[in-house]
Amino acid sequence: MGATGSELKRVRQSKRANLRNRHYKSMMKTAVKKVLLADKDTATMLLKQAVSTIDRVCSKGIIHKNRASHHKSKLTKYINSL
Protein backbone atom coordinates (compact mmCIF):
# COMPACT_ATOMS: atom_id res chain seq x y z
CA MET A 1 0.00 0.00 0.00
CA GLY A 2 1.21 3.48 -0.80
CA ALA A 3 2.50 5.87 1.80
CA THR A 4 1.76 9.25 0.22
CA GLY A 5 -1.33 11.20 1.15
CA SER A 6 -2.97 10.98 -2.26
CA GLU A 7 -2.49 7.21 -2.42
CA LEU A 8 -4.05 6.75 1.00
CA LYS A 9 -6.94 8.98 0.02
CA ARG A 10 -7.55 6.96 -3.16
CA VAL A 11 -7.66 3.77 -1.07
CA ARG A 12 -10.28 5.33 1.20
CA GLN A 13 -12.29 6.57 -1.77
CA SER A 14 -12.20 3.24 -3.59
CA LYS A 15 -13.38 1.38 -0.46
CA ARG A 16 -16.29 3.79 -0.12
CA ALA A 17 -17.15 3.48 -3.82
CA ASN A 18 -16.95 -0.31 -3.63
CA LEU A 19 -19.45 -0.40 -0.76
CA ARG A 20 -21.78 1.98 -2.58
CA ASN A 21 -21.60 -0.01 -5.82
CA ARG A 22 -22.23 -3.30 -4.01
CA HIS A 23 -25.29 -1.81 -2.31
CA TYR A 24 -26.85 -0.65 -5.58
CA LYS A 25 -26.01 -3.87 -7.44
CA SER A 26 -27.55 -5.91 -4.64
CA MET A 27 -30.66 -3.74 -4.70
CA MET A 28 -30.97 -4.26 -8.46
CA LYS A 29 -30.50 -8.04 -8.23
CA THR A 30 -33.12 -8.27 -5.48
CA ALA A 31 -35.64 -6.35 -7.59
CA VAL A 32 -35.00 -8.64 -10.57
CA LYS A 33 -35.37 -11.78 -8.44
CA LYS A 34 -38.69 -10.55 -7.03
CA VAL A 35 -40.05 -10.20 -10.56
CA LEU A 36 -38.83 -13.65 -11.59
CA LEU A 37 -40.35 -15.37 -8.54
CA ALA A 38 -43.77 -13.67 -8.65
CA ASP A 39 -46.92 -14.75 -10.44
CA LYS A 40 -48.10 -12.84 -13.51
CA ASP A 41 -50.26 -10.19 -11.82
CA THR A 42 -47.73 -9.40 -9.13
CA ALA A 43 -44.84 -9.59 -11.57
CA THR A 44 -46.30 -6.90 -13.81
CA MET A 45 -46.51 -4.53 -10.84
CA LEU A 46 -43.03 -5.45 -9.65
CA LEU A 47 -41.66 -4.92 -13.17
CA LYS A 48 -42.22 -1.16 -12.86
CA GLN A 49 -40.24 -1.08 -9.63
CA ALA A 50 -37.47 -3.24 -11.09
CA VAL A 51 -37.16 -1.06 -14.20
CA SER A 52 -37.02 2.03 -11.99
CA THR A 53 -34.28 0.46 -9.87
CA ILE A 54 -32.31 -0.61 -12.95
CA ASP A 55 -32.55 2.90 -14.40
CA ARG A 56 -31.41 4.42 -11.10
CA VAL A 57 -28.38 2.12 -10.95
CA CYS A 58 -27.56 2.93 -14.58
CA SER A 59 -27.86 6.68 -14.04
CA LYS A 60 -25.33 6.47 -11.20
CA GLY A 61 -22.85 4.84 -13.58
CA ILE A 62 -22.73 1.54 -11.73
CA ILE A 63 -23.82 -0.50 -14.74
CA HIS A 64 -23.56 0.38 -18.43
CA LYS A 65 -26.69 1.63 -20.20
CA ASN A 66 -26.61 -1.32 -22.60
CA ARG A 67 -26.53 -3.74 -19.67
CA ALA A 68 -29.49 -1.93 -18.11
CA SER A 69 -31.36 -2.16 -21.39
CA HIS A 70 -30.53 -5.87 -21.59
CA HIS A 71 -31.94 -6.49 -18.10
CA LYS A 72 -35.14 -4.55 -18.83
CA SER A 73 -35.64 -6.35 -22.13
CA LYS A 74 -35.16 -9.80 -20.58
CA LEU A 75 -37.59 -9.04 -17.75
CA THR A 76 -40.23 -7.70 -20.13
CA LYS A 77 -39.85 -10.71 -22.39
CA TYR A 78 -40.19 -13.02 -19.39
CA ILE A 79 -43.38 -11.28 -18.20
CA ASN A 80 -44.91 -11.48 -21.67
CA SER A 81 -44.21 -15.22 -21.82
CA LEU A 82 -46.19 -15.91 -18.61
Image (spheres, grey):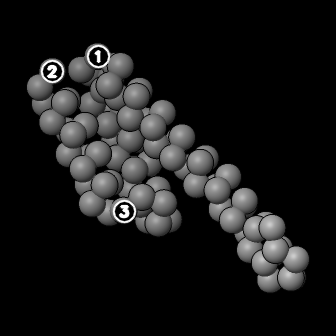
Q: Amino acid at mark 2?
A: Leu
Q: Nearer the viewer, mark 2 or mark 3?
A: 3
Q: Amino acid at mark 3?
A: His
Q: Which residue sits at x=61%, y=47%?
A: 23
Q: Which mark is residue 12?
A: none
Residue at disc 3, secondary structure? loop
**Position in image of residue 60 (x %, y %):** 50, 65
Q: Which residue sits at x=29%, y=45%?
A: 71
Q: Quadrant of the N terminus?
A: bottom right
Q: Which residue sits at x=34%, y=19%?
A: 38
Residue at disc 2, secondary structure? loop
Q: Quadrant of residue 12?
A: bottom right
Q: Is residue 48 left or right of residue 10?
A: left
**Nearest the eye: 4 or 67:** 4
Q: Is residue 63 left or right of residue 66?
A: right
**Position in image of residue 65 (x %, y %):** 32, 63
The answer to whether marks 1 and 2 mark residues whose Cβ atoms lie closer than 8 Å is: yes
Sequence-wise, the earlier of marks 1 and 2 is 1
Q: Amino acid at mark 1?
A: Asp
Label 1 sits on residue: 39
Label 2 sits on residue: 82
